[in-house]
Image (cartoon, coloured by chain):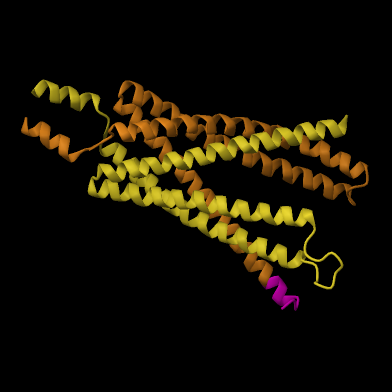
Amino acid sequence: MLEQEESFLQTELQIDSAASSYLKDTAVWSRITGIAGFVLSALILVFAYIYAEKNARPSWYKSGGMSTDQLVALTMYIIIALLHAILSYLQFRFGNQLLAAIRNEDSMELNRCFRNIKVFSIMRGIIAILMVLLLSIAVIGLGNVAV
Amino acid sequence: MEQGQHLLSNELQVDNFAQAHLKETAMWAKLLGIVGFVMSALLGLFSFFAGTIFDNMSSRGYAYDKNAAAMGATTITVVYLIFAVIGCMVSLFTYRFAVKMKAALVSSDQTSLNDSFKNLKLLFRVYGVIALIYIFFIAMGLLFGGLGAILSGGF
């Protein structure tokens, strides 16, 4: 029985003092990054609003409203701000849950925080893939124009 | 026996659920690391061609002043190189986190797990510092922009 427990202790991964110290630091920085991310998202939204205000045509103008290009740019600003806010929220929540898990030695909270960082990584991975696709399309488009 | 139980109840365990989450996180982190390396390399490469691109633009009449174009090219090269180096650093930490985590989960190696978390800490530290620097620059821009507008009678 004792041997079984010893082997269990040896094979099971643990959050020991070193890991705990690294994770605490990670949590603190994650919270800071999350808060900074919220501020940046808000600023992007403010810039989007200013952009819309500046480029909106007066109501007496024949076609009214913004041009298609301006609408696309405004939509992009809003999408970027929203994505940034979601990522920042996940980071902030990860930091909070990680600190709580370590402080209270709560394995359920630890699982929740690891699930958070998984979702955060998946979102960033999908964004990276989309960026690479857009970049490839842009490069192919530029190549065609050059030819 | 009691000591074993004491150890079991006191230390946080990375159980099966946590391992599953960490495994998937590592998979995506590896992808992010590789994409980051490629992007950083492309950015670094582009930074060296910025001078040529700006020279072409000025020779075709897109820029007013050749000196200004040359200064712009140098600035863009330096700025893009800095971005490429930071991107490379972030990608390295992400990739190392992923590789060490995968090794830790496959062989139940505590040292690899600790190394992996160490890289995660460095990654989040870099993110935090970048975010703070970014906010500082925006705050400075808003401050000086506002001051400029007030002094020039814009408000």
Viewer-side residue, A105 vs B136: A105
Does residue B1 lie above or below A101 as drawn? Answer: above
Q: Position of residue B26 (x, y in %)?
A: 44, 31
Q: Quadrant of the C terminus of chain A?
A: top right
Indicate the quadrant where residue A134 lies: top right
Chain that the image shows in orange = B
Indicate the quadrant where residue A12 lies: top left
In this picture, residue A42 sits left or right of residue A16: right
Viewer-side residue, A71 vs A105: A71
In this picture, residue B108 sits left or right of residue B57: left
Q: Residue at x 63, y 34 (%)?
A: B39
Q: Position of residue B151 (x, y in %)?
A: 72, 76
Chain that the image shows in yellow = A
* First to last magenta residue range: B147-155
Does residue B130 lie above or below B28 as drawn? Answer: below
Say if the magenta span includes residue B151: yes
Q: Residue at x 78, y 47 (%)?
A: B72
The number of callouts visible is: 0
